[in-house]
């Protein structure tokens, strides 16, 4: 009972509760003019599930007595992200959402630009396809990607955020969420109906992304029709506009206004139309107009305009701003919205920190190197094959004894003996062969734009200096008596200054004595049972000192300094130290009890004062700026930024001496993974595991440099690009990326003599299609439009033989 009371106290301190739903701040800017043509579809005839309840076990969203809090149910009608929605009211007995089972929803027969769902899955990342049926009996299929309604310890970045959820017995103060999805429709045809997936496949958000059984729920549907226009016309419509807290890199904080613009006409907008997008406002002046050089009918562009406050206007003020599109032979309407003027200070609240978003440098960087290096690199073992586990979890596996499936217990006993404990490895973590310059030169050769160094893993050994009243379990106080993170950062600044510098940081420590009181396993709501085996183990880890599994002796925690409170006296000063060292990404892990709103607000504000834009992942105890699927990737575009991370080792981040050299990811795997992830709005964080002396094994270096040569010669198709609104892919082997100046087609397999694309790619008569990279770089390829509208590109044997790993073709605008 005492432990339960401590839990309630922790919840009161570390979780914010509200009495109203929170709408994601980025999509809450209100239009003051311009008619909103979207309209909601009444889904009540298809409702078959009850998601909202006023008290525990009143409703059962997931079949287990869990539900959303009805006290925070959204208004019956609201506008979000430029779309009109209709939401069910609370009903003590009736249904309020659609549990997807292949239902067909008829819509008013018309031409539509897109449809939008408010949806959530019961667990994992649900994926399926929605089939759009048109009046001519043709159909298109669009991917649907929806996260779980609640997620812990990695909070989801929902569009509608609730302060809690209800279980069978109590209120669980983990936030629950509903997500907006936006899908393209063929606006040249009249739509008749939408058919939901018959079943929803799912992938776990835990390591490996294993398939899971899940169910998908839809709460609301909004349709965006296409207004009737004259044939042969070019018309652009502004769907949404908002202020951001971002600014143009390298400028004196020139604020970015983001607009979403749709081509609702029947003709292409091309470079010769000279389209510019500007802001007219008494509070703002346009510094850098947005431009559109190519936009096909039925396509969408996200356009950024650089603005600054007019003289006398303070940052944080707000007022009207009007988006104006100018161009030759292009019609449009103005769009006025309530803008936030300038870059405001962040506050230590959930809502304020949630308004932060990934800066453009991170969105454009695409590719980073992850480095897991610590005391676990000394044993460097995690078994192999079906028994392989994360080698950096060696101590945890050892402490578990014979129950650990990786056989670490037997391996350790045979190799080191029963009296050799984990902390005895510390003196052998020498970094004796380490040259930080060699590392950053390798990262640059690999084609990466940033790196993330593990600064402290769950073992609690920090690779940077800290005050003695915080801990002496560091690489400075202990072997090798060096500030390893600082040395790496310094080498990067000197030798490879283009690399963005970042750190991984674990908030919990497995066996820190003062973390014991935060034992996650006793938190109310039974949340532990919904998690993967690996997360269950780490979240039940707070049991104080480790034990020698061979002798049952309680072990001392080397470098331990007694603390009044682990969160206040250790986590917060450690995160602040890393911020002061200049980390540009705070890549946390595990989360749990935290003071992240306090840390992040100060960090964001301090960085902004220095004209720096920083970014935080979803593992610091808050949703952060991007999601982090681990040894997994997404099946479609996720509009919220995400980053897939995995090791070159088939299933370990830390060095695993048991892994056969042939099992390491090769250059082809690196390149094709990067392309696939980037096409879906992701970044790729590829991990290496150096040995204890600081050596990156040869096979990893070789493959990184081989992939890097390809990446550098095809860089324009990867970096500074974004996803295509229509679709990220065609079939298994074709991916698309776009930039302001070109459209890129990536073939993940060696192409045949012709490459035929049925997707409505933005090719117009007279365009040249050129080869990017390889021995035939710059070669112009024959291209033609077929009678069915497909585009056929002729690929000669020389072009096919002139590259490797992937083939890239460019349509310049």
Image (cartoon, helix red, strand yellow):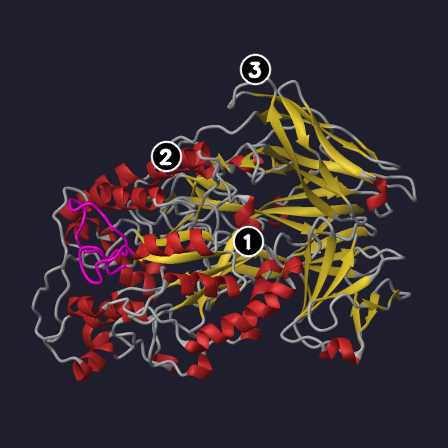
| Viewer can see residue 98 | no
Q: Earlier in the sequence, mark 3 or mark 2?
A: 3
Number of numbered discs visible in the structure rendering: 3
The magenta stretch spans which residues? 458-483
Residue pointed to by mark 1: 365
Q: Quadrant of residue 287?
A: top right
Q: Which residue is rendered at x = 46% and y = 63% of the image?
A: 441
Q: Are marks 1 and 2 in contact (CB under 8 Å)?
A: no
Residue, disc 2: 602
Task: Tell me if I can see residue 34 in this picture.
Answer: yes
**Residue at (9%, 75%) from the top-left corner?**
419
Kindly report the secondary structure that dominates the magenta region of the rendered protein: loop
| Foreground residue among 309 and 86 | 309
Where, by quadrant of the figure, is residue 809 drawn?
A: bottom right
Whether tag 1 and tag 3 are in contact, CB under 8 A, the answer is no
Residue sitting nearer the eye, 498 or 91? 498
Q: For the residues marked 1 and 3, what is the alpha-carbon distance in whole angstroms?
A: 36 Å
Q: Which mark is residue 312?
A: 3
Is 406 on the left or on the right of 635, as rendered?
left
């Amino acid at each position: 009972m005492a432990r339960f009371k401590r839990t309630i106290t922790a919840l009161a301190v570390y979780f914010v509760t509200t009495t109203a739903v929170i709408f994601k701040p980025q999509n809450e800017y209100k239009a003051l003019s311009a008619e909103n043509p979207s309209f909601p579809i009444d889904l009540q005839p298809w409702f078959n599930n009850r998601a909202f309840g006023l008290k525990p076990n009143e409703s059962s969203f997931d079949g287990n007595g869990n539900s959303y809090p009805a006290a925070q149910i959204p208004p019956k009608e609201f506008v979000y992200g430029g779309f009109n929605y209709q939401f069910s009211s609370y009903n003590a007995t009736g249904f309020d959402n659609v549990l997807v089972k292949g239902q067909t929803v008829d819509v008013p027969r018309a031409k539509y630009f897109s449809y939008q769902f408010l949806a959530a899955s019961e667990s994992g990342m649900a994926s399926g396809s929605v089939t759009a049926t048109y009046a001519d009996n043709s159909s298109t299929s669009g991917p649907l990607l929806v996260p779980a309604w609640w997620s812990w310890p990695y909070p989801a970045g929902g569009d509608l955020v609730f302060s809690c959820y209800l279980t069978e017995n109590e209120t669980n103060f983990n936030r629950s969420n509903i997500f907006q999805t936006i899908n393209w429709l063929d606006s040249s045809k009249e739509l008749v109906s939408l058919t939901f997936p018959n079943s929803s496949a799912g992938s776990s958000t835990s390591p490996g992304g294993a398939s899971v059984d899940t169910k998908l729920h839809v709460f609301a549907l909004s349709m965006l029709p296409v207004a009737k226009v004259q044939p042969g016309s070019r018309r652009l419509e502004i769907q949404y506009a908002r202020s951001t807290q971002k600014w143009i890199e390298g400028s004196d904080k020139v604020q970015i206004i983001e607009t979403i613009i749709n081509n609702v006409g029947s003709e292409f907008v091309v470079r010769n139309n000279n389209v510019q997008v500007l802001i007219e406002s008494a509070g703002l002046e346009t510094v850098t107009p947005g431009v559109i050089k190519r936009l096909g009918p039925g396509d969408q562009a996200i356009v950024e305009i650089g603005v600054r406050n007019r003289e006398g206007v303070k940052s944080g003020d707000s007022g009207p701003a009007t988006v104006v599109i100018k161009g030759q032979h292009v019609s449009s309407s103005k769009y006025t919205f309530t803008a936030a003027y300038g870059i405001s200070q962040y506050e230590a609240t959930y809502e304020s920190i949630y308004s932060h978003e990934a800066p453009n440098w991170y969105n454009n960087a695409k590719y980073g190197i992850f480095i897991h290096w610590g005391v676990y690199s000394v044993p460097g073992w995690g078994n192999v094959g079906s028994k392989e586990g994360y080698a950096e979890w060696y101590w945890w596996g050892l402490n578990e004894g014979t129950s650990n499936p990786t056989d670490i217990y037997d391996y350790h006993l045979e190799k080191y003996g029963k009296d050799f404990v984990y902390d005895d490895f510390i003196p052998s973590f020498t970094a004796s062969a380490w040259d930080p310059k060699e590392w950053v030169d390798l990262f640059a050769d690999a084609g990466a734009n940033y790196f993330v160094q593990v600064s402290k893993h769950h073992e609690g050994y920090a690779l940077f200096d800290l005050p003695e009243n915080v801990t002496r379990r560091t690489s400075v106080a202990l072997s090798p008596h060096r500030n390893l993170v600082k040395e790496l950062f310094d080498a990067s600044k000197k030798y490879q200054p283009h690399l963005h510098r970042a750190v991984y940081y674990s908030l919990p420590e497995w066996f820190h004595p003062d973390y014991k009181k935060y034992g996650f396993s006793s938190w109310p709501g039974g949340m532990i049972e919904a998690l993967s085996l690996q997360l269950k183990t780490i979240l039940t880890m707070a049991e104080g000192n480790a034990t020698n599994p061979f002798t049952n002796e309680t072990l001392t925690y080397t470098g331990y300094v007694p603390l009044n409170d682990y969160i206040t006296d250790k986590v917060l000063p450690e995160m602040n130290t890393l911020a002061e060292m200049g980390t540009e990404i705070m890549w946390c892990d595990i989360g749990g009890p935290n003071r992240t709103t306090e840390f992040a607000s100060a960090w964001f504000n301090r960085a902004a004062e220095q004209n720096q834009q920083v970014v935080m992942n979803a593992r610091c105890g808050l949703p952060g700026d991007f999601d982090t699927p681990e040894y997994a990737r997404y099946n479609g575009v996720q509009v919220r930024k995400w980053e897939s991370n995995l090791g070159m080792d088939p299933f370990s981040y830390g060095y695993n001496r048991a892994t056969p050299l042939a099992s390491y990811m090769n250059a082809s795997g690196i390149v094709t993974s990067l392309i696939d992830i980037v096409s879906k709005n992701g970044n790729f964080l590829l991990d290496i595991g150096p040995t204890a002396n600081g050596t990156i094994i040869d096979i990893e270096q070789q493959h990184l440099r081989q992939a890097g040569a390809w990446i550098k010669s095809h860089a324009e198709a990867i970096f500074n690009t974004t996803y295509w609104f229509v679709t990220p892919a065609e079939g298994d082997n074709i991916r698309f990326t776009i930039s302001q100046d070109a459209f890129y087609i990536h073939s993940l397999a060696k192409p045949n003599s012709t490459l035929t694309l049925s997707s409505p790619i933005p090719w117009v008569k007279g365009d040249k299609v050129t080869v990017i990279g390889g021995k035939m770089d710059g070669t112009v390829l024959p291209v033609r439009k077929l009678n069915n509208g497909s585009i056929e590109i002729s690929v000669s044997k020389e072009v096919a033989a002139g590259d490797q790993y992937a083939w890239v073709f460019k349509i310049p605008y």
